[in-house]
Image (tube, helix red, strand yellow):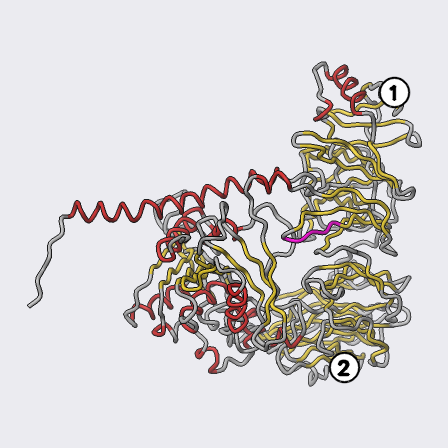
Amino acid sequence: MSKKVWIPVGWLLVGVVQVALPLMALALMALAQLGAGEAAQGAVLNGRLEVRWLAETASCWYRRQSAPGRQEFVLVDAVQGTRALAFDHQLMAEALSTVLSRRVSTENLPITDLRLVDAGRTLLIAADGRWWEGPRSTLALAASSRPPVSTFESTPRPTRETGEATSLEIVNRTAGTVELWWSTFDGGRKRYAHIPPGETSRQNTFSGHVWIVTDKDGGVLGVVEAGAGPSRVEIDGHSVQRSQPQRDPNHSPDGQWQVFLRGHDLWLRPRGETGDVALTEDGTDEDHYDLPVTWSPDSTHVVAKRIRPGEGRTITLIESSPKDQLQPKQRTIAYAKPGDRIDTPRLCLFRIADRAQIAVDTRLMEEPWSLDDVAWNADGNAFTVLFNQRGHQIMRVVEIDRSGKARALVEERAKTFIDYAGKSYFHRLPGPAEILWMSERDGWNHLYRYDATTGQVKNQITKGGWAVRSIEQVDERAGLIWFTAGGMVPGEDPYQLHLARVACDGSGLTRLTDGDGTHSVQWSPDRRWFIDTWSRVDLPPRHVLRDGLTGKLVVDLETADDSALRASGWQVPERFVAKGRDGTTDIHGVLWRPKGFDPAKRYPVVECIYAGPHAAHVPKAFRTRYGQQDIADLGFVVGMIDGMGTSQRSKAFHDVSWKNLADAGFPDRIPWWKAAAATRPYLDLTRVGIYGGSAGGQSAMGALLFHPEFYHVAVADCGCHDNRMDKIWWNELWMGWPVGPHFAEQSNVTNAAKLQGKLMLIVGELDDNVDPSSTFQVAHALEQAGKDFELVVVHGTGHGAAETPFGKMKRAGFLVRHLGGPKN
C-alpha cells in the first residue's frame, strides 16, 4: 500500500522560488540585452555612410566619425579620385559661433547639408534650419538669400532611406497645375499637393525621401531627393526631359474610345459622344469581364480579361480586447488556401471596327495561375502575355496575333517547381525585338537572350556554378545589364552578394565589386559612380567609391572601427561550414556565444531555424545586434544554418524542398552541429533547443516530432503546422498542386502523437499571415494525444507574436527552464 507524504505548502513555495529565481534572472538579463544591443549600435564608428551627391557635379560629401561624439565633413571628387576635409573645421566652428550667437564645437558642427556654388568657390551650408554662405577660403558666413535648387532627376525611384527632418519648397513655373507625390518605399506614389501656376508649396519631409512632380495627366516633370537641409526646386517643364503621360489604359491611344464596365460587361464610349455601345453581352456573376484592357498601338484592337471567380475563401480574426471598446471586434479577410478553386482568367480579343470578338487559342494557357504583362508588339500585329500555369512547373511567353492564333516564344518547364516568386525575370528589348529571360535550366539561376520574332535562344548571357540574384539595371541602348550574384568568387561564402555587369550577347562579364564580404551599393544620380559597402558578420563595413562601368576603385572612403564594441564584451559571431547530408555539399551557418563566454564551460545549444525555400536566411552582413545574440546571452550558444531546400544556391540544392517541407534541412543541420561540436567541446549536444516563427515555427515543432533523438526543447511561433492551412501561393509553390497525400504525411497535426521533448506554442490572435487556427489545430491534436505542452496566446497582436515583449519573455523563460545554463 502506497504511503502519502504531505509537504508543507511553504516549503514547496520556497523550493520553487529557489529554483525559479536564477532562471528568471537569466531571462530578465536577456530582455535587458535588447536595450544594451541598441546602445551598442553607436559603438561602431563609420558603420554606415550617408553620401550626398552635389548638383551637376561628380562630387559628394558625407560625415565621418573621427571618434565617439566627434564628426568631420568629407568632400569626395570622383573625377579626381580625391577625398579631403570639406573645409577647415576650426574656422567653421568660429564662423558658426558668430552667426548663431552661441558657442559651436569643432567636434560636433550643427551642419545638416552643404553645397558648392560659384564653380566651387562658395560654400553653402544648412545649420539651425537656415542656409548660410561664404567663401571656402575664409568661411566668412552670412545668411544666404539663395537657398540651393535641388538636382532634378528624370526617372522616378522609390524612397530608400529616412534621415533628418527637413523641408522642400516647390515653385511651379509652368502654365498648368502640377501634382506633388511622395515616392513610397515600395515604389508606389502618395499625392500630397496640387500646385497652381505661379504658386509655391512648402512640404515638410525627411532627408532621403524622394518626391515626384507630374502634370495633370501624370507626365513626370521632375524627381528630387530631399537633402539634409531646407531646399527649393523650380518646375519649368524644361529642366528635365518630360516623360510620357501615364495614360489611362482603358482609353485608346488615338483618344477616340474608352472601354468601361457596365455590370459584368465591357462597353465602348466614343469621344465626345453619348452613344455608348456594348462590346460584350454575356458577362455574368460566374463569368465576368475585367479592367484594365490593353489597346493595340493603332487603336483597332483591344485585349481584355474574363474571370471565372474562385470560391473566395475567407478567415475570421477576433480581436478579444480592442483598445477603443469593451466588446470584441471581428475582421474577415480573403485567404485562399492550397487546393482551393481560384479565380481563372482568360484573354479576350476584340476588333473595334465591327465590335467582333476574335476567338483566342488557349491551348498554351490552360489551368492558369496568372496571365500577366500583356503588351502589344511595336508593329501592333500581335501581343504577348506571360503565362504561369498553376502548379508552377510551366511558364511561357505566349504571342497571340490578330487572328487569335497563339505560339510560345519562350517556354520554361521544371519537374519540380519554377521559382516564379524569387527567380523570375522577363524584359522586352526593342529594336531588334528581343527578350531577356531568367532560368535555372542549366542547374543555376542565369540570364538568357531570346529572339522575340523566332522564339529561339540567341545566347545564354551568364553561365557558371554561381547564381544571378537580381537585375539592377538594363541599358537598352548600350546593351548592358547590371546584376547582383552570389558564388562568383571561388573560396568565398556563396551567399555573399557582388555587383557585376555583362553585355546582352554574353560578352564582357565584369565583376564590379571586390572584397571578401557581402556587398551593397549606393549609386550616384547619373549612375556613373557607386559607393561599395561590404562586410561580414565577423568583419565591420568598408566603404569605397567605384566606377559604375568598370568597377575600378576610385578612392577608399572609410573602414568601420568596432574596437569599442569588442572591448565592451560583444562576442563576434563565428562563421562555420560543414558538409551536408551527401558528405560533399558545404552547409553554411553562424554561431553566437553569450557575453562573458567561457570556453572551459559546457553550454546548451539553441538553433534559430527558418527553412523557407523562398530565400536563404543566415545573416551575412555586419550588425551590432542580432536577435540570436539576445538568446545566446541567456547562457546558450546559438546557431543558424541554411540547409538544403533553401534558395540562392544551385537548383539541385533548392529542389530538396519540393513536396518535402518537413525535411527543413534537418539531415544537414544535425551533422553541421556534430561537426561544430567535434572541435568545440563547449557545445553540449545533450541539451539542444530550437526556436522559429512562421515556417520556422512549423520546423521547430517538426524537430521534436521527427528528430527527437537530437532536439529536446522547442518554441514554435505562429507556425504553419499543416501546409493545407496556410496561404495558397507559398505552399502550392513548394508543395505542388493538386494537393496530394504528402501534405497530410508531413503535417505537424497528423504527426502530433509523435511528440517527444518540451514544446511551447505561441500564436497571435490577429495573425493575418498564417491562419491562427493552424496553431490551435495542432494544439487540439496534442490534447487528443495526451501530450504535455504549453500554449501562449498573445492578444492584440499578429504575425511574429514571439517577438513582442511578452512573447520574448515567455520564450526566454521556457528555454532557460528546460535547458538550464552553462555547466563546469
Q: Which residue is mark 1?
A: 138
Considering every residue shown, the one lying at the far left of the view is 1
Q: Which residue is mark 2?
A: 408
* Residue at (37% x, 68% y) in the render: 777
Residue 483 belongs to magenta span: no
Side (left or right) of 557 relative to 160:
right
- The image position of residue 577, as x and y in percent, is 61, 65
Mostly what secondary structure, the magenta segment? strand
Side (left or right) of 523 relative to 204:
right
State the residue in front, 247 or 116.
116
At label 2, counting other C-alpha atoms closer than 10 Å, the crowd grade (few under 14, some 14-19, many 20 or more) is some
- The image position of residue 719, as x and y in percent, is 45, 64
Residue contact between numbered discs 1 and 2, judged by CB atoms under 8 Å: no
State the residue in front, 683 or 787.
683
State the residue in front, 497 or 677.
677
Over which residues does the magenta segment extend? 533-537
Residue at disc 1, secondary structure = loop
* Residue at (56% x, 38% y) in the render: 39
Image: 462 above or below 149: below
State the residue in front, 497 or 240.
497
User: Quadrant of the image for the N terminus?
Assistant: bottom left
Identify which amino acid the numbered label 1 is placed on: Thr
- The image position of residue 551, as x and y in percent, is 85, 55
